[in-house]
Image (cartoon, rainbow, N blue to C red):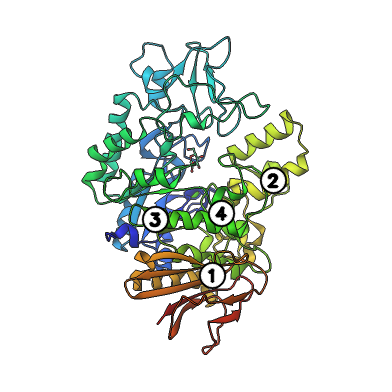
Amino acid sequence: MNKAWWKECVVYQIYPRSFYDSNGDGVGDLPGITQKLDYLKELGIDVIWLSPVYKSPNDDNGYDISNYQDIMDEFGTLADWDNLLAEMHKRGIKLVMDLVVNHTSDEHPWFQESRKSKDNPYRDFYIWRPAKDGREPNNWRSIFGGSAWQLDEQTGEYYLHLFTKKQPDLNWENPRVREEVFKMMDWWLQKGIDGFRMDVINMLSKVPGLPDAPVQNKDRYQFGGRYFINGPRLMEFLTEMKQKVLSRYDILTVGETPFVTTQDAIEIANEQTGALKMVFQFEHMDLSAETGAGIGTTQPRRLSDLKTVMSRWQKDLENQAWNSIYLGNHDQPRSVSQFGDDRQYRVESAKLLATFIHMLQGTPYVYQGEEIGMTNVAFESIEDYRDVATLNMYREAVEEKGADPNQTLKIVHAKSRDNARTPVQWDSSAQAGFTAGTPWIKVNPNYKEINVTAALADPDSVFHYYKKLIQLRRDNPVIVYGSYDLILDAHEEIYAFTRTLENERLLVILNFSKNSPVFELPENIAFSSAELLISNYAVDADEDIRQFNLRPYEARVYRLG
Ligand code: GLC
Ligand code: CA
C-alpha cells in the first residue's frame, strides 16, 4: 500500500459556531479557535476540518453560502482566518476547509441574478423548470422536508433545492458553473490550505429529464435519490475537478457521499485513478436510522450488523481505496450516546469507541467534544432546538401528520443534529466556559461533570485515552497500514479483529456490551507472548489472554509476539 500523510493523520472536526466564543456574542468564532489551538496540539491531532466559515445567512448554519471568498460576519474576518491558518501551520496542524458546491444560498449574487429573468446570463447557473400540470416539475421530496421545488414569483418558474428552499442547487451541467467553482477552490488552495471536505459531493449530477421518483408511501413528495445520487456525470465532474485543480496540490480530499457503496468508493477514491483521496460512507450510521432527516426510527443497532458493514468496508477497500473512519459529526447524535452507554459506562464506552475508530484501517475523524465524551442532550421544549432539519421534521410530523408532540420530542432527543451542536464544554463555570454571553443554543446541563478542564486534570479521562491512542498510531505503522481480519465473527457482544503488517500483528478486543462475556482466542491465532498496548481498564500483567472475562465495554489492544 502506498504511504501518504493523509493516511497517517488524525483529523479533528470543528463546528465553529459551537467551539469557542472569544467576544461574548454567544457564537463561536475564528479567534476562539485560534485561542484553543494549544489544547488541540496537546491532544495530538494533525489536521483540522473546519465546517463552513464563509459568508452565509445561516439558514443551515453556514451550509448555505452567499460568498465563497469571504468570512461569515459572526465568525470574524479574512484577517482572522489568515491568522488562524498561520498559527495552525506554526504548530504543524493542517487545515481542511468545507467545500459546499452542490448548492449556494439563495442570497448568493449568482442566484440573485439567476432569478431576475429567464434570459439572465446566470439563469442557467441553477436548475429552473416550468410548472407541470399546474404544480411542481416532479414529485421529489427535499431532504429537509416538503417539496424539493420552490416557485419563484418573478419568472413564474420553479427552482430545485435538494435541501432547504434557501439552498438552491447549482447546475453542474453548465461548464461556467464548474469553471467558477474550480477558480474559487484554487483561490483557497493558493492561500495555503491543505484540503477539502466536500459536502454531499455525490449529488452533483442529476439524471436528465429529472424523472418522478418511485412512490414508496402515501406522502405527497418522494425520495428521488436514484436520480441525483452518483448520477450519470458525477465521475466526469470529479475527474475534471481533479485535472484542473486537485492534482496540482498535495492535499487531503474527502467526499461526503450518502448512500455510497464500496464499489462506488473504489471508483471515486481509487488508489491509482480516483478523483478524491477518500469518502465518508454512511452504512454504519444508517443501521438504526433513516438518513438526512435528522429524525428517523430509533431501533437499536445490532453488533452483528455493525461487524458486517465495517468488515465489508475494510476488506473491499483494501489496496484499492482508503477508508475514512468516524462515529460522529455535526449531523449525527453524539457517538457515545448512539454506540455506547452515555450514563453508567460513559467513560468506559467512550474509550472503547475511541479504540475502535483508531484501530481500524483508514483515517480517523474525531468530532469536537468526542474527546471528552460529550453526550446527547434532551431539551424539554422544541423551542430550544435550532437545527432547520429538526424543526422542519417536527413541524411536518406534528402539524401535518398529527403525530403526538411528546412522542415526536423523544425522537428529536435521540436523533436531532443539535445533539452534536451544543457548545463545547470547556469548564464548570456558567455556560460551560463557552461564552461570556448567552449561547446561540443552550449548553448541555451535564457540563459541570463533563468538561475539558476536568478531563485534563484526570489522568484516566477520555481525553488522555484519546491522546494515548493518537500517539500509538504515530508510533506503530501497523495501526495505519496493517490489513484487517475479523475474528470471533459470530460473537454477539465482542467485536474482535487483528491487524497485520509483514510479521507484526495486533489483536483488538472490544466488548460492545454491559455484560461480561468470555473471550476465547481462536486456535489459529498463534502467539508466544503478548504485549498490552492500551486498555480502558487496569489489566493484570500476567493474565492469560487465551481466555478471560471482559468487563463492561472493555477494550484491549495487544501486540502479538
Ligand atoms: C451535508 C452537511 C449538512 C448540511 C447538508 C446540506 O450533509 O453535512 O450539515 O445540512 O449537507 O449542505
Ligand atoms: Ca463570537
- Residue at numbered disc 2: 411
Q: Is 141 on the left-hand or right-hand side of 63? A: right
- Depth check, mark 2 against mark 3: the one in front is 2
Q: CA distance from mark 1 to mark 3?
A: 20 Å
Q: Nearer the viewer, residue 328 or 66?
A: 328
Q: CA distance from mark 4 to mark 1?
A: 18 Å
Q: Nearer the viewer, residue 551 or 422?
A: 551
Q: Amino acid at mark 1?
A: Val
Going from N to C along the chain, the mark reached first, 2 or 4, is 2
Q: Amino acid at mark 4?
A: Pro
- Residue at numbered disc 4: 423
- Do the residues under discs 2 and 4 have CB atoms within 8 angstroms? no
- Residue at numbered disc 1: 462
Going from N to C along the chain, the mark reached first, 4 or 1, is 4
- Do the residues under discs 1 and 3 have CB atoms within 8 angstroms? no
**Residue located farthest toward the left when viewing the structure as drawn:** 248
- Do the residues under discs 2 and 3 have CB atoms within 8 angstroms? no
Residue at left 57%, top 47%? 286
Going from N to C along the chain, the mark reached first, 2 or 1, is 2
